[in-house]
Amino acid sequence: MPSKKVLKYFDATACRETREELRLAVSIVEESRVAIDCGCGAGSDIAYLRKQGFLVHAFDIEEESILRCESRFKDDEDVLLSLASFSSYNYPDASLIVADSSLFFCPEHEFSEVWCKITSAQLPKGVFVGSFLGPEDTMASAHYDKESYWPEVLVLSEEKVKGLFHNYKIISFTEHRMSGTASDGDPHQWHIFSVVAKKESSAVSRLTSTNGEAG
């Protein structure tokens, strides 16, 4: 069962405004309109992508997410949902891969393999849009109560994030630093790197660290 914080997050983001980065990413897709939504949550990005004519494959590790999306898109045959983790999901070929506020929760020891799966599924000239958790975010703090939200978080430096995209042309890279209140009402300091990038070749991207670990 998801935590109360996860449920509140789903409630708060079900009909959120589409982010500028996703609009940009959609505008530069050249290939067939097939998207993967990694960590689809309550389905706000799925809804936008369907309006833009995409066939959408979507997955989430939370059963509550899939149940909500099954109800929301029950009459739409072009929304294909899976209950899966980043590492267990079978990634189809896609011209657009979306991973907004979801790779934060990919276990660090699985990230290298997961990233290879994501980039292998990305068609040549395909577009990636997503975000990565920076080291100064509240969730990256040793004092953050991970048990009340999610037990593992993946934290990457700006250098590591940019290093992931050496087989891509980075279209947009934004570092977000904001203070405010999270969906659960708790104070939060956000530190997030948002990326829109277009794949330049069919080669599989790799982590740039010598030992292949994220950090």
Image (tube, rainbow, N blue to C red):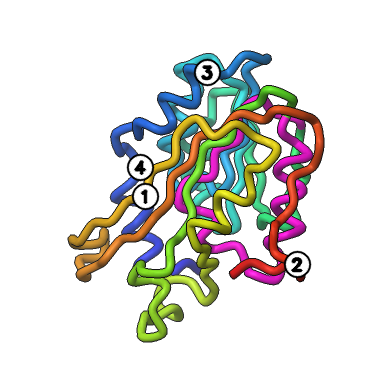
Q: Which residue is drawn at 20% across and 69% down?
A: 187
The amino acid sitting under disc 3 is Ile
Tell me if 93 is positioned left or right of 68 in this view.
right
Which part of the image, by quadrant, shows the C terminus?
Answer: bottom right
State how far apart marks 2 and 4 are (Cα): 40 Å
Callout 3 crowding tier (Cα within 10 Å): few <14, some 14–19, many ≥20: some
* Mark positioned earlier in the residue sequence (3 or 4): 4
Circle 2 sits on which residue? 210
Lower sequence index among marks 2 and 4: 4
Residue 23 located left or right of residue 197 = left
Identify residue for label 4. Answer: 14
Q: How crowded is mark 4: few (under 14 residues within 10 Å), some or many (20 or more)?
A: some
Position of residue 75 measured from the top left corner of the image (x, y, whole percent): 54, 24
| Residue 65 versus residue 125 in the image, above or below | below
Which secondary structure, mark 3?
loop
* Marker disc for residue 28: 3
Q: What type is the residue that disc 4 sits on?
A: Ala
Where disc 1 sits, the SS reads strand
Amino acid residing under circle 2: Thr
Task: Give the residue at mark 1.
Answer: 175
Mark 2 surroundings within 10 Å by alpha-carbon count, few (fewer than 14), some (14 through 19), many (20 or more): few
Write down the region rendered in magenta.
Answer: 93-122
Q: How far apart are marks 1 and 4 (CA)?
A: 24 Å
For the point 35% across and 60% down, which residue is it?
A: 191
Q: How far apart are marks 2 and 1 (CA)?
A: 25 Å
Q: Do the residues labelled 2 and 4 touch (CB within 8 Å)?
A: no
- What residue is at 70 percent from the left and 27 percent from the top? 200
Closer to the camera: disc 3 or disc 2? 2
Q: How far apart are marks 1 and 3 (CA)?
A: 21 Å
